[in-house]
Image (cartoon, helix red, strand yellow):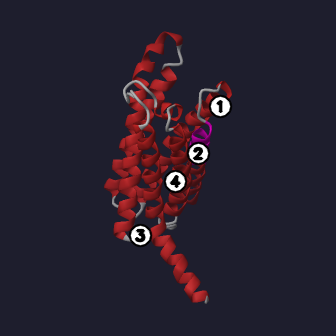
């Protein structure tokens, strides 16, 4: 019985990270897509991603975001276990894990609290910023770990820095638009937010497929 349990744990360890990653983006895409199709006149260039929760399909957007965030936590935790402990500093892995969990939990909260009510909107906005900042941190750390790990192609880590760049760009423009004389930058934020969303989806997709294909 103990041997069966050990073998079962090994199987989960090998495939679950990639599977969880695919489940995360699947639920996120489905929720966004349904909300988008039910939102008349929605324009990706002018409306933020979170605006989807204000439309008729808002519940689908919120549910998809929450479930996506839950699977993202599992994906990122299990992904860390695929790296060789002898090659990666334990502190780096710890910081990557903590920042990933904070980012994903904030992502879940912003999905749960989304609406036109001022208090809900405030909670949503604060958690969005937290998710972005710690998202930038954990993706950068994961890319660094991937480059250092013999289990992975270095090109996968280099590719991941494209996502780091799009997230950094969005954060810079978001922070700049807070200055009164730079408020006009708000007009480009929805486009940058959608670019970052697609970039994150692509990163999760590529890493998940790589892990499953290589049986890491």
> Marks 3 and 2, Cα distance to the nearest angstrom?
28 Å
Q: Residues within 10 Å of mark 4 (few under 14, many from 20)?
A: many
The residue labelled by disc 4 is 72
Q: Does any portion of residue 67 appear in the rendered image? A: yes
Asked whether the residues under the numbered discs 1 and 4 touch, taking CB atoms below 8 Å apart as contact, a structural biologist would say no
Q: Secondary structure at mark 1?
A: helix
Helix, strand or loop for the magenta stretch, by majority: helix
Residue 71: % across, % down = 53, 56
Residue 88: % across, % down = 50, 61
The residue labelled by disc 3 is 216
Q: Nearer the viewer, mark 1 or mark 2?
A: 1
Q: Residues within 10 Å of mark 3 (few under 14, many from 20)?
A: some
The residue labelled by disc 2 is 108
User: Which residue is located at x 40 percent, y 35 percent?
Assistant: 194
Among the 4 quarters of the image, the one containing residue 156: bottom left
Residue 7: % across, % down = 52, 82
The tag earlier along the polypeptide, 4 or 2, is: 4
Q: Nearer the viewer, mark 1 or mark 4?
A: 1
Q: Residues within 10 Å of mark 2 (few under 14, many from 20)?
A: many
> Image height check: is 105 above or below 195?
below
């Amino acid at each position: 019985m103990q041997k069966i349990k050990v073998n079962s744990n090994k199987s989960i360890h090998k495939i679950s990270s990639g599977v969880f990653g695919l489940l995360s983006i699947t639920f996120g895409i489905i929720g966004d897509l349904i909300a988008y199709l039910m939102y008349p006149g929605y324009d990706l260039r002018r409306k933020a991603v979170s605006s989807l929760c204000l439309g008729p399909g808002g519940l689908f957007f919120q549910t998809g975001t929450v479930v996506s965030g839950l699977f993202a936590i599992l994906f990122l935790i299990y992904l860390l276990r695929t790296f060789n402990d002898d090659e990666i500093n334990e502190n780096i892995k710890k910081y990557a894990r903590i920042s990933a969990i904070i980012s994903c939990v904030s992502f879940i909260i912003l999905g749960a609290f989304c609406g036109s009510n001022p208090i809900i909107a405030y909670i949503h906005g604060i958690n969005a910023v937290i998710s972005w900042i710690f998202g930038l941190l954990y993706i950068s750390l994961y890319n660094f770990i991937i480059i250092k790990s013999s289990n992975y192609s270095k090109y996968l880590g280099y590719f991941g820095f494209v996502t780091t760049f799009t997230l950094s760009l969005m954060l810079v423009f978001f922070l700049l638009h807070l200055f009164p004389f730079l408020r006009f930058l708000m007009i480009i934020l929805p486009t940058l937010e959608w670019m970052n969303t697609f970039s994150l989806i692509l990163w999760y997709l590529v890493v998940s497929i790589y892990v499953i294909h290589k049986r890491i």
